[in-house]
Image: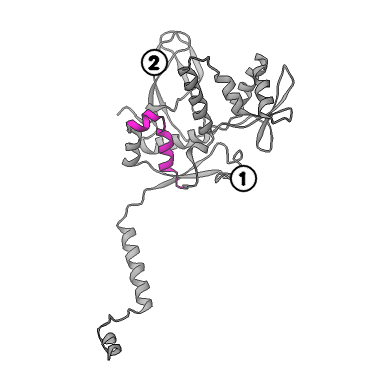
C-alpha cells in the first residue's frame, strides 16, 4: 500500500537524453548572454628560451592576453595598488589568460612587451610624454607612435649555455654565467634599496643587481664566493657586464629619435619609459 502511494505521488522521471539536451541549451543560452572579452597573442622577446623547465612559458613564444576593460582601469586607478607599487603586477594578473603564469616571474622584457601591447589595444598607438634633453636639461614634449611592436635583435656573437649568458671579463678574465632578471628580482632589489635608505646605509644598487644576475664565476656557484668576487670586481669588468647584459637582454624595441629644439642635441638612444603615466594618454 505504501509502495503504491509512493509511486502515485512521486514526480515522473525525465528521460536522460532530454535532460542532456536541456542542459546543453541552457549553457548555450548563458554563453549567448555573456560578453566574451576579445583576446590577442603577444610575441615574447625571450621566446620562452630563458625560463626554467617547470615554468608555464618554458620554450613558449607567445602569451595570450585579454583586452583591457573597465575592470583593468579600476586596477590602474587604485590608490592602494599605486601605494604598494603593485599596479602592473595586478594588471598583468588580470589580463593574462593562463592563470598559471605569475606576473612577478616574467622576464622584464616580456613584461614590457605585454604591457605595451595592452596599452596599444586599449588606447591606440599614439603616446605623448616629456623627455629631458641630456645636454641642456630642457624638458620637451615627444609625440610617439607605436607601430607594429618589434622585439630587439640580439647580437650574433652572444654565447648561451643552458639558458645562461656567458661573459668573459676583460680585466680579470673571469668567466661569468648570467641570468636575466624577472619582475620579482627588480622588486626585491628595490625593496632592499628602500630598507638600506631607511637605515641610513650606503646604496648598493650595482652590488644588489649583480647578486641577482651572476649565477656562476669560473664555474663556481657558491653564493659567498660570488659575493666576494662582486665586492672586489674591477670597474672595467663591472661596466662590461652592464654593457653586455643590456645588449643581450630580450626586450621590446621602444627606442625613439629625439632632437632638442633649444640646443639642437640629437639623441637616437632614447627609450620610452613604462611608468605610471604610460597608461594615461592625453585625450
Q: Is residue 194 left or right of residue 280?
A: right
Q: CA distance from mark 2 to mark 1?
A: 45 Å
Number of disc labels: 2
Q: Are marks 2 and 1 in contact (CB under 8 Å)?
A: no
Answer left or right for 249 relative to 237: left
Question: Does 200 sit above or below residue 23?
Answer: above
The image position of residue 266, as x and y in percent, is: 49, 14
* Residue nearest the viewer, comparing 258 with 113: 113
Q: Quadrant of residue 125?
A: top left
Assess whether residue 9 is covered by the magenta stretch.
no
**Residue bearing the label numbered 2:** 140
Quadrant, the N terminus? bottom left
Residue 274 or residue 229, whichever sits in front: 229
Q: Residue at x 36, y 67 (%)?
A: 24
Q: Which residues are magenta?
A: 79-97
Q: Quadrant of residue 159?
A: top right
Vertical arrangement, residue 279 with respect to residue 55, above or below? above
Mark 1 residue element: loop
Between disc 2 and disc 1, the foreground one is: 1
User: Against 49, is 195 above or below?
Assistant: above
Which residue is label 1 attached to?
Answer: 53
Amino acid at each position: 500500500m505504501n509502495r503504491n502511494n509512493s509511486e502515485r505521488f512521486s514526480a515522473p522521471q525525465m528521460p536522460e537524453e532530454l535532460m542532456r539536451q536541456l542542459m546543453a541549451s541552457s549553457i548555450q543560452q548563458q554563453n549567448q548572454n555573456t560578453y566574451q572579452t576579445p583576446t590577442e597573442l603577444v610575441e615574447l622577446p625571450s621566446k620562452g628560451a630563458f625560463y626554467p623547465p617547470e615554468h608555464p612559458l618554458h620554450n613558449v613564444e607567445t602569451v595570450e592576453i585579454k583586452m583591457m576593460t573597465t575592470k583593468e582601469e579600476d586596477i590602474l586607478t587604485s590608490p592602494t595598488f599605486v601605494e604598494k607599487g603593485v599596479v602592473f603586477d595586478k594588471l598583468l594578473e588580470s589580463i593574462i589568460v593562463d592563470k598559471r603564469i605569475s606576473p612577478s616571474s616574467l622576464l622584464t622584457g616580456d613584461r614590457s612587451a605585454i604591457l605595451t601591447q595592452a596599452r596599444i589595444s586599449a588606447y591606440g598607438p599614439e603616446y605623448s610624454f616629456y623627455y629631458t634633453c641630456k645636454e641642456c636639461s630642457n624638458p620637451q614634449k615627444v609625440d610617439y607612435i607605436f607601430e607594429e611592436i618589434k622585439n630587439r635583435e640580439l647580437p650574433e656573437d652572444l654565447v648561451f649555455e643552458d639558458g645562461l649568458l656567458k661573459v668573459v671579463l676583460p680585466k680579470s678574465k673571469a668567466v661569468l654565467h648570467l641570468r636575466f632578471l624577472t619582475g620579482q628580482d627588480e622588486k626585491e632589489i628595490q625593496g632592499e634599496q628602500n630598507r638600506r635608505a631607511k637605515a641610513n646605509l650606503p646604496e648598493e644598487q650595482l652590488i644588489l643587481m649583480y647578486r641577482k644576475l651572476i649565477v656562476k664565476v669560473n664555474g663556481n656557484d657558491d653564493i659567498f664566493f660570488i659575493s666576494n668576487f662582486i665586492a672586489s670586481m674591477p670597474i672595467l669588468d663591472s661596466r662590461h657586464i652592464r654593457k653586455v647584459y643590456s645588449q643581450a637582454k630580450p626586450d621590446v624595441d621602444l627606442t625613439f629619435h629625439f632632437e632638442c629644439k633649444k640646443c639642437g642635441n640629437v639623441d637616437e638612444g632614447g627609450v620610452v619609459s613604462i611608468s605610471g603615466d604610460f597608461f594615461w594618454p592625453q585625450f
